[in-house]
């Protein structure tokens, strides 16, 4: 019985300290129905543009036991198996979560030439892949938004601590206790637009 | 009788020696490792697939859920899995 209690405590501590990774998507981008996402993809946002190939950003998570270099090499090998793909390792990039690697791949789709940039970040036996995609022709129009979103990638065990202002953090903790779930949801959606939709979703999911 | 059992036992122990195995443990570990590494990278591929396919699928039904709706869906799925 003691062993069971001990194991339960370990599990609980692990759950309490479970890390979240989020990014701030470009402003006013739409949330894609999670039912249509691929298995490793946790969330996807799409631009509201009128192009046939709409720009998007998504975050995928994969459990791994390899280093960042090994993962990038594995991805390069997969893309390289198709001669039409052009893969490039763009090197290191600094994000809120830490140092990551940026890659780019140009590929042919049934809707035309597409460009994807994938930021790859490895931590605690998990790899986080933030993918930005658009048609090759329009990609440069979104470069600034993509770059800002990439650098906003954050790894945290406490979502509230990511709010820059202490007063807002304190108010949130108070509201969490005093408001009912519906009012708390409204509060998060209205007062924390700057933190991005994904952060809001993660907070409301807790 | 005891001698027979001992001889049979020794035979089975000797025959299970790795030296007689078709594949050594290190070979097996290497093959397993290679198989594992071949599946590495699926997250990136899923991300790429979603980026290229969601754009067109999004024109249909299911695009642009509200955040509140998604949060409610997440709560519901957590609740049902907890019930299970």
Image (spheres, coloured by chain):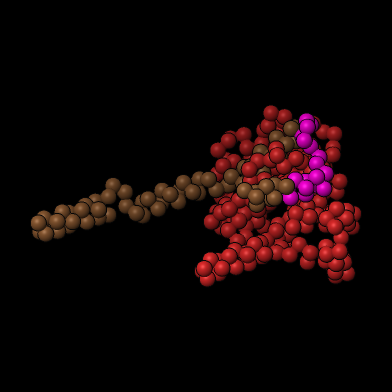
Chain B as rendered: colour: brown
Quadrant of the rendered image containing residue A123: bottom right
Residue B52 to residue A199: above or below: above
Q: Residue furthest front?
A: A1
Residue A7 to residue A201: above or below: below
Image coords of residue A171 (percent x, y): 87, 66
Residue lying at 56% horizontally and 42% vertically, measured from the top left: A78
Residue lying at 67% horizontally and 33% vertically, measured from the top left: A108
Residue lying at 72% horizontally and 42% vertically, measured from the top left: A34
Residue B77 to residue A69: above or below: above
Residue A135 seen: no
**Toward the viewer: A159 or B69?**
B69
Q: Tell me where the magenta segment starts and ends, as one range.
A: B58-75
In the image, is B55 to the left or to the right of A179? Answer: left
Q: Residue furthest right?
A: A190
**Toward the viewer: A109 or A125?**
A125
In the image, is B47 to the left or to the right of A181? Answer: left
Residue B11 seen: yes
Identify the chain drawn in red: A
Image coords of residue A187 (percent x, y): 88, 57
Quadrant of the rendered image containing residue A167: bottom right
Residue lying at 74% horizontally and 32% vertically, measured from the top left: B57
Q: Is residue B73 magenta?
A: yes
Residue B84 to residue A51: above or below: below
**Toward the viewer: B61 or B58?**
B61
């Amino acid at each position: 019985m003691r062993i069971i209690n001990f194991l339960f405590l370990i599990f609980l501590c692990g759950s309490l300290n479970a890390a979240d990774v989020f990014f701030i998507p470009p402003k006013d981008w739409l949330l894609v129905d999670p039912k249509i996402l691929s298995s490793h993809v946790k969330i996807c946002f799409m631009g509201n543009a009128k192009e046939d190939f709409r720009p998007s950003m998504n975050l995928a998570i994969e459990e791994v036991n390899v280093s960042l270099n090994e993962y990038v090499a594995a991805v390069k090998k997969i893309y390289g198996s198709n001669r039409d793909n052009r893969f490039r390792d763009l090197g290191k990039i600094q994000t809120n979560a830490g140092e990551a690697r940026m890659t780019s791949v140009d590929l042919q789709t049934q809707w035309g030439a597409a460009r994807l940039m994938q930021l790859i970040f490895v931590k605690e036996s998990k790899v986080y892949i933030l993918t930005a995609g658009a048609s090759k022709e329009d990609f440069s129009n979104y470069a600034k938004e993509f770059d800002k979103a990439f650098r906003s990638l954050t790894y945290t065990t406490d979502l509230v601590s990511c709010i820059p202002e202490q007063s807002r953090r304190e108010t949130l903790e108070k509201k969490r206790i005093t408001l009912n779930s519906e009012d708390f949801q409204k509060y998060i959606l209205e007062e924390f637009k700057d933190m991005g939709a994904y952060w809001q979703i993660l907070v409301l999911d807790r | 009788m005891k001698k027979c059992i001992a001889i049979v036992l020794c035979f089975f122990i000797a025959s299970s020696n790795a030296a007689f195995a078709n594949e050594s443990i290190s070979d097996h570990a290497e093959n397993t490792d290679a198989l594992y590494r071949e599946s590495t990278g699926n997250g990136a591929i899923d991300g790429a697939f979603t980026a290229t396919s969601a754009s067109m699928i999004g024109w249909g039904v299911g695009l642009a859920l509200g955040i509140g709706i998604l949060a409610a869906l997440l709560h519901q799925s957590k609740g049902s899995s907890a019930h299970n």
